[in-house]
Image: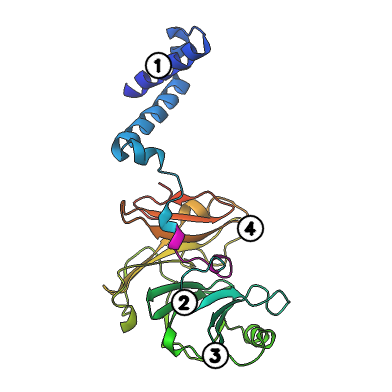
Amino acid sequence: MLCVVFAWLALFAYAAAKGRNISLFSVFYNLPITLAFGALAFDLLNRALTLGWTRFFKHHERPDVLDDAPGPSPWYLRAGKPVVPGFTWGPAGESSQTAGATVLSGRDGPVLILDFHNYVMLIDPDTLLVWHQRHVEPGPSAPVVLRIFPVADLRRLEGELEELCGSMRRSGAPFISFSSPLCEFPVPTSDAGRGLRLSFPEQLRHVDELLILCHSSAVEESPPVDRSNLALLVAHPREGTYELFPQDWFNSARLDYGYQGVTRVARDPRTGRIHGEGTRISPFVLDDTLQNRW
């Protein structure tokens, strides 16, 4: 009943604004449309009252919390984030060997080269966390490998960037460094939809939460071109748990998955909601299931 009332009010208000008359007969004659319109109006009002008017109108805006969220290299490192004191991010070059590679350089020169699709965050002022998932097809999806680099241990790379990047790509490695990571820790991606236990490295046990985008064969193994198997890996290193949430809203949207994709996510500390953005898609907010848009 409330839906119909809201629909009547909206239709009469529209007609008045247009200077037209609208009869009760026309409302009842178009009852299915009236009910649908009323349901939409009621839902919008309910959301506005639940969120508060200010938050309602800002609900689908891109939140500032995404500004510092990790995104795939090289695109999201071009802005110079994350800021590593005493170091700068920059492109390795534009040749066939160096294009797309990103270099972290200190006062004495380059110390780390990253290939495509590495995510980087500073877990404390002295420690870099870098993660990457290798593409595997067909078969079980590869784990997301977490690599921890103490900034003070990064040594200057010897040689030309052209040669170093060529060596990195010929070996299939996602990075090159003359300093081995303090640890390399794989997080499996072949099980989704349930909470899992995992003992994370000691260096990560002070971290409350990591939000990691990955592809999972548990969602779908070798999906066709009109589907994807994207999942959100929510890890709680302090608790020793993680879970993969299939991104149903994205995987079944029949997008052009070669050109459209989700690139980064972040949790808004004020609302607890997870926001995200991507390439050629609108910013989004996940619902309570973490599998669909809100």
The image shows residue 6, relative to residue 78, as above or below, that is: above
Q: Earlier in the sequence, mark 3 or mark 4?
A: 3
| Residue nearer the viewer, 150 or 109 | 109
Front of the two marks 3 and 1 = 3
Q: Earlier in the sequence, mark 2 or mark 3?
A: 2
Q: Name the residue at 51% across, 9% down.
A: 19
| Residue denoted by label 4 | 259
Q: CA distance from mark 3 to mark 4?
A: 36 Å
Image disc number at residue 130: 2
Q: CA distance from mark 4 to mark 1?
A: 43 Å
- Is residue 69 within the magenta segment? yes
- In this view of the protein, can residue 134 be seen by the observer? no
Q: CA distance from mark 4 to mark 2?
A: 24 Å
Q: Earlier in the sequence, mark 4 or mark 2?
A: 2
The image shows residue 292, relative to residue 27, as above or below, that is: below
Question: Residues in magenta?
Answer: 67-77
Q: Of helix, strand and loop, which one carries label 1? A: helix
Q: Residues within 10 Å of mark 2 (few under 14, many from 20)?
A: many
Q: Position of residue 112 (x, y in %)?
A: 54, 83
| Residue denoted by label 3 | 156
Q: CA distance from mark 1 to mark 2?
A: 56 Å
Q: CA distance from mark 2 to mark 3?
A: 18 Å
The image shows residue 41, relative to residue 249, as above or below, that is: above
